[in-house]
Amino acid sequence: MLKTLKIACLLCLICINTGQSQTEGTGLKGINFFHGTFAEALAQAAKEDKLIFMDAFTTWCGPCRRMASTVFVDEAVGNFYNANFINVKMDMEKGEGPELGQRYSVRSYPTLLYINSEGKIVHNSSGARPPESFIELGQDAIKKFDKSGNWAKLYDEGKRDPATVLAYIKSLNQVGKPSLRIANEYLSSQKDLTTPENLEIILESATEADSRIFDYLVKYKEPISKLKSKAVYENKIWMACSKTMKKAMEYRNESLLNEAQEKAKNIPDRYDEFKSTTDMDYYGATGDADKFLVAAKLYSTKIAKNDAAKNKILSQLCLKNFKDNKKIMDFAEKAAKKALELQEQQDHYINYGRILFYNNKKDEAIAIVKKGLEVAKQKAEPTQMLEAMLRDWGVTI
């Protein structure tokens, strides 16, 4: 399911990011990395009650560079990591890096560390990961940071001031536990929903588009956007609609798909993207080739355009869902070729070669992967994947 929903934001356990003061912009695409010392990052993590994600890298590490150029810039990755972590990049050979590398026993690169505000490792992993796996790794870290039981105890004892309720709802959302009952119970007791505290609770609680609280989110768009930012507000709309889309996928319920898409009109600048990606996800999973292709063409002309990564994603979705459909696979081949023409890097050679092979163009596939192998060697990049593909196709290296 996670891979199916990739470009519709990889529906995650979210806690909307509200602490952008020292991060790199408020963008909706890619990870916003914290600017400051590690001590300042720890203080920010304590303030926001979040974990730190640290990318422990070196400048000469090929997998580190690939993660930086293809994974950290991924929109779904950014949505998830910006919402749930204070994100830090640390060169293990410069500045604070050597001391932190020794403290956390970093022996290989990249090492992906999840650290609490006390400076203790909660979760860690070594080696590069693709976007889906990287998000799953972050979800595993969050599950180990579950504080919802502590807040539940306070709430059940009658401590129901806005700060406690907000913290309780956030802790539930972070680990993927239901929070709507608590939010509805609290908000129904409030005479004025426009106080800053209540607006923040609405923002945090609107995790699904098919809910009364989402309607509050839409109703109070202006004060919430003013309280936080337009980017935070729109990101919340996107994620809530994506979660409803997840339910549509799970239950094969097209009316839920339509509801999610209708609610996504509240972010008009991104509506075409949401409509096309969710249509591809849904109709890909349900096997409706005609509707999938309509959505794929919309995504290609309106969204992917001259974006190499998005053209690659488009081609992969075609391959994943309709590898035996000639019309769709011809379309996938064009998208994969365009991705490579836009950005001559190893993963695009691999992707284009794989799709050519599935389209029964073995000689062309071999030629493309061989070219990718030459380019990788020139860049001093690891070549194992390219070599493995050629061996699988019976080519002697």
Image (tube, grey):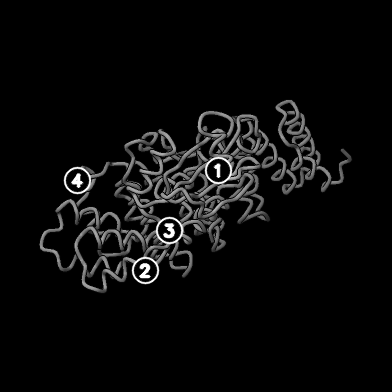
Q: Which of disc 1 and disc 3 is earlier in sequence?
A: 3
Q: CA distance from mark 2 to mark 4?
A: 34 Å
- Mark 4 or mark 1: which is in front? 1
Mark 3 sits on what residue? Answer: 13
Kindly identify the amino acid type of the residue bearing the numbered disc 3. Leu
Residue 52, position as x, y percentages in the image: 45, 47
Picture quarter with the N terminus: bottom right
Mark 1 sits on what residue? Answer: 103
Residue 122, position as x, y percentages in the image: 50, 55
- Mark 3 or mark 2: which is in front? 2
Kindly identify the amino acid type of the residue bearing the numbered disc 2. Gly
Q: Is residue 276 above or below residue 163?
A: above
Q: Is residue 162 above or below residue 342?
A: below
Kindly identify the amino acid type of the residue bearing the numbered disc 1. Arg
Mark 2 sits on what residue? Answer: 149
Mark 4 sits on what residue? Answer: 222
CB under 8 Å between callouts 3 and 1?
Answer: no
Q: Which of disc 2 and disc 3 is earlier in sequence?
A: 3
Residue 321, position as x, y percentages in the image: 60, 56
> In the image shown, does 129 or 42 lie closer to the viewer?
42
- Mark 2 or mark 1: which is in front? 1
Q: CA distance from mark 3 to mark 1?
A: 30 Å
- Name which residue lies at 77% across and 37% down: 364
Q: Which of disc 4 and disc 2 is earlier in sequence?
A: 2
CB under 8 Å between callouts 2 and 1?
Answer: no
Q: Is residue 290 above or below residue 110?
A: below
Q: Is residue 264 above or below residue 147?
A: above
